[in-house]
Image (cartoon, grey):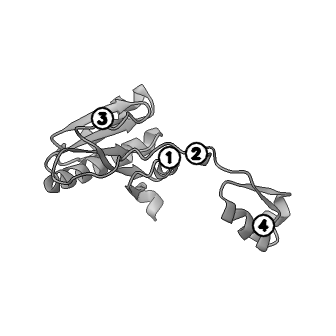
């Protein structure tokens, strides 16, 4: 791939410092420009100091920001939340969506996509992450691979990352 890039690219702008050195070492001029999600000062960790264990906690469910992602991921996320709830009965789950129209897409996909059941404490929110609640601290997130994983990483939120594609794509 780098051979093709050398012919097509005058200079590559990279988001992480190690990338510039990697590409320069392969003969492709590169300059580190940074990533807006990692500009100091970074926000404090959203997960708080420590979760005492056993008590109430919050797990964010992040299906992605595009219609097709939400349709593929909604049933999988709800099934995963049900499994987590079996081990952490006091957990509450917050589905975070980017736009108001996504709420209807999520609900329809969850119903049509074969989610076995819903976790007992489930809330659907539109917009950015809310401040952690002191009575149910953020334990972590289950997130579709994408920009949100960089945001979670910058906020030091433990996460399980996944990406599910259509059966046709898997061929």
Closer to the chain start, of discs 1 and 4, is 4
Closer to the chain start, of discs 2 and 1, is 2
Q: Is disc 2 surrounded by few (<14), some (14 to 19) or many (20+) residues within 10 Å? A: some
Q: Which quarter of the figure has residue 163?
A: bottom left
Q: Which quarter of the figure has residue 11?
A: bottom right
Mark drawn on residue 37 = 2
- Look at the image and tell me whether residue 130 can be seen: yes
> Camera-side residue: 44 or 139?
44
Identify the element where label 2 is drawn: helix
Measure the alpha-carbon separation of dots 2 and 4: 29 Å
| Residue to which mark 1 is pinned | 151
Residues at discs 2 and 1 in contact (Cβ within 8 Å): yes
Q: Residue at x 36, y 34 (%)?
A: 105
Q: Residue furthest top?
A: 100
- Look at the image and tell me whether residue 1 can be seen: no
Mark drawn on residue 4 = 4
Residues at discs 2 and 4 in contact (Cβ within 8 Å): no
Q: Which mark lies nearer to you, 1 or 4?
A: 1
Identify the element where label 1 is drawn: helix
| Residue to which mark 3 is pinned | 108
């Amino acid at each position: 791939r780098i051979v093709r890039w050398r012919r097509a690219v005058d200079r590559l702008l990279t988001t992480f410092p190690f990338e510039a050195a990697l590409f320069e070492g392969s003969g492709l001029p590169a300059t580190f420009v940074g990533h807006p999600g990692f500009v100091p000062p970074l926000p404090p960790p959203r997960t708080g100091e420590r979760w005492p264990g056993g008590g109430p906690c919050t797990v964010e469910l992040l299906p992605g920001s595009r219609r097709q992602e939400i349709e593929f991921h909604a049933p999988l996320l709800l099934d995963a939340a049900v499994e987590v709830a079996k081990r952490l009965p006091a957990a509450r789950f917050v589905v975070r969506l980017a736009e108001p129209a996504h709420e209807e897409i999520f609900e329809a996909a969850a119903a049509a996509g074969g989610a076995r059941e819903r976790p007992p404490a489930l809330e659907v929110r539109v917009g950015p992450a809310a401040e952690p609640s002191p009575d149910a601290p953020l334990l972590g997130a289950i997130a579709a691979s994408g920009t949100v994983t960089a945001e979670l990483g910058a906020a030091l939120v433990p996460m399980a990352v996944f990406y599910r594609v259509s059966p046709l794509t898997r061929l």
